[in-house]
Image: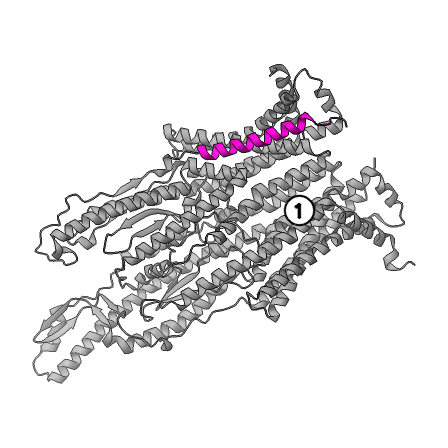
Amino acid sequence: MPAPEHTPIAAITRRVMIEQLRDYRLLVLGIGTAFLLVLGTYVSLLDYAQRVKTFALLRSSRFERSPLEAVLLVRTPPRLLFISEGGESTIPSTLVAIPGFIDAPQDQITSRSLLPSGAGLDWSFTFAYIFSLAALMCTADLVIRQRAVGVLRVVMSYPVRRAGLLAGEYLGAFAALLPFVVVALAAGHALVLGSRAIEWGATDWIRSAAFAMLTLAFLSLLCVLGLAISTVCRDRTTCLLTAITVWVFGAIVVPALAGPVAHAIVQTPTEREHHDRLQETQRHFDPQIFVSSEMLMPLTRAGLSDAERAALARSAQADLVARHEAKLSEYKQQLLAIRRDYLVRTTAEARLAAKVSLLSPFSAYTRLAADLAGAGVKNQDAFYSASERFLLSYTEAALELRRRLRPLAHVMGPTVEVDGIKLQGVASISYADVTVDRGAIPTFSGYEVPLRDSLTAALAGVLMFLAADVVVFSLLVYRFNRYVFD
Amino acid sequence: MTIAPLIAVVTRRLQLQLRSVTWWGASVLMFAVFAAAAYRSVPLFDMDRATFESDQARHADEASGLPQTYSRLSLSIDREPAPLRLLLRGSEDAFAASVTTYGRFRPTAFRGRDTRSSYESSLFLVDPAMVLGLLGSLLAIVLASSTVVREREEGTLQLTLTYPCRRSTILFGEHLATLLIVATPMLGCTLVFLAFAAVSERLRLDGPVLLQVAQFLGLCILLASAFSGLGLLVATTVRRPTTAITIAFALWVFLVFAYPIVLPSIAALVRPVEPSASSLAAADTLAEYDLVRRANDVSTSAAEQDELRGHLAQADLHDSLALVSPYSVFIIGVETATGTGTAACRAFLQTVQTAASQFRRWQDGMLSRYPDRATWYDPANPPLDLTGLPPNQTERSGLSGRSAPAALILLVWNALFIVVTQVQFARYDARP
């Protein structure tokens, strides 16, 4: 019984690995990937610094309104943007909370970039769209290459099953990718840690390791797919063209179709429609509590002392304000219902798009990497959840403060006066001029995507890719057992 | 140039390609993805029209009222959606579609069409024109890269070179055949879609629109030709078909995929736009749901316009850097031709600024004559003096685009590839 390193499979693995490492395509793409990854990391770190600056500017800027009227909540930029940008630039970065209601403001046109929505040159992009080419194209002609020069017949004479042969080919091709992955990731980490642009903690090492596992699982699936192409096609050119087709389909066509397909099924309202619905509700809402001289009649009846009259007037005025606030609360319930409907539908669309994108390993990998890094939709969801929780405490505190500070507020509305008693109708109440101790208002302390969510995404991805590996490899063995060498 | 051998080369190549699975597969894929992109583009276009019409109606309604103070007056400029937004929405999708200026009383309000949901923005949200560009260029470069080198390997190239004509004629024939075979599905998709749009009354095929369509088709042909030229260059440079396909595909990935995707990040880094108070101003718009009016701070208007100019400058830098890739030049050319690019945004901003200053001058003149009627309403007053009030405007910048510069750059790329390929092929060793 030979030692494991001297078995025929190990010999095939070694030979294939060395052959692959000498392939100029792998060398060019591998070195290019490492270079792009370092460049992308540098760009991502600069981008992160810019986002942090903007974040600090928005957080530190004194929102010009009284906190009793509105507070601005700012989305925390994810720290691991260099792993995956995840479409961060396309997601609203602020929410505005007013007592009883919260929503993303329709962003100003002036603050929008006119650049096409490109991708960040992050690690997941580099592996998914650049290095994937190396994994796919270098294995796509592996078997056919050996067949063409007659090596395959010799190899078939080894005392080993055909499945074993394939396993050796696969392991060799996969092992040849490892040095490039290791060097690229090591260089990326060195740059991140050396630059000290982000605070690097223990959980980041765990996320980073999970990303490496996810990447290896993804690349292993591409190797198996490449081998499958190599055993199905009968000449090298066809193999390469098929590999190109697989890449174009997986990397471009399926991701391009995922959004439209999900949108066609769910029919989400657009941002404009959402804001139009909010404004329409506002237009039909009349907050005005009118006052008439008849309302003052009970206060002018005979037999009341001045003190009683004043107390009754105060009570009547308070009743008017309370009725205004009850009306306002009902109005905000309507707004909240519109927002909830919008969020439910857009989230359903996003989830469906995510499921459709799982049809392609390329888009599945980038999506899972974004979830792992806590960027994009995952970050937005965490932000929204934290904001909804904040709204409850903020509304409670703001309404309580409003009750206490109401005498200082500017109440607008027509006034009626009978026998020296005044009663003011309520159109709106402004707290803009009221000085408020901001410490009495809860602060939005920020949030982070939980590590558990990141690891769940990584684990799901690894298992999914490995399961696909097993299925494709089984089909491959079935096919290879019938392979004809003419 | 002798025409008969040229026709023979073209015919033979066409016959070969028409039998190839690659061409049929790519054409079917192109039709399918184009149809999917068009399926998404049509409702977006309908929404654009509906938004434009509702904005226009709302502004007309506001203008027809009887305001009692000069602070209640405004001037709106609505931008009609470009007819060929059906093919490409371009960068103006992020720009204002409607602007309302209030003179000295409130900041200018910019509103976008925003016909996409917030979750829909993604890296691969492709428009029909982008599908043609992506898949057409891929088909062109792959087909062209497997011509000369494969013939050399199979031994038929030596036979072809015995034709009574120059080598340049043979190469030109190969180029022409590849161009024809690639341009056919591209133009087919476009014409079928535009015919559908015309029949469904979404597009009126009048003079300016036909000119835009002609520019678009011309750009498609130039793009296919450029990538065909690049493919032939690869084919005449390497000695093995597999190497040719690999290099051609790598070039395509770089020029069509990687570079255009990474370019926005580069432009954003080189020419950053500092965030202004506009986000806070945006927050104010929502604070209005608490039914308290915002402060009349016109200074934010100037800050927002500065930011807008910053974004335009950034987009210009992006467009300049994009010249490296023929695909990016094609997209910029289509944006210009269809009036959906940075130039259209700049033209609209210019219109807005002119109209706003005109309105401001009129408002200042009136306020100097009737200072007490700026904000104070007295029921006893007669109606406002509206003599000379500039009317609301409609901008039709989507019809005035000229894509000549982009076409010229594509021609330069074409000429470069063809000349270098001819030089390579003139000394090409045709032995298998």
Furthest toward the right, the residue is A1
Magenta residue check for A248: no
In-front residue for pair A228/A113: A113
Q: Position of residue B404 (x, y in %)?
A: 44, 32
Q: From the viewer's perspective, is B147 left or right of A99? A: right
Does A91 appear above or below A291? above
Element under disc 1: helix
State whether residue B308 appears in this view.
yes
State whether residue B192 appears in this view.
no
Name the residue tied to disc 1. Answer: A133
Label 1 marks which chain's residue? A
Does B17 appear above or below A118? above
Q: Residue visible at 13% across and 84% down?
A: A307
Q: Position of residue B166 (x, y in %)?
A: 65, 19
Q: How many marks?
A: 1
Q: Residue visible at 67% across and 37% down?
A: B245
Identify the image quadrant of the N terminus of chain B. top right
Q: Position of residue A112 (x, y in %)?
A: 41, 52
Q: From the viewer's perspective, is B233 left or right of B184? A: right
Instruction: Give, as a single range, the part of the protein colored magenta.
Output: B403-429
Q: Residue visible at 13% across and 55% down?
A: B371
Q: From the viewer's perspective, is A308 left or right of A80? A: left
What residue type is disc 1 on? Leu
Which of the 4 image quadrants contains residue B273?
bottom left
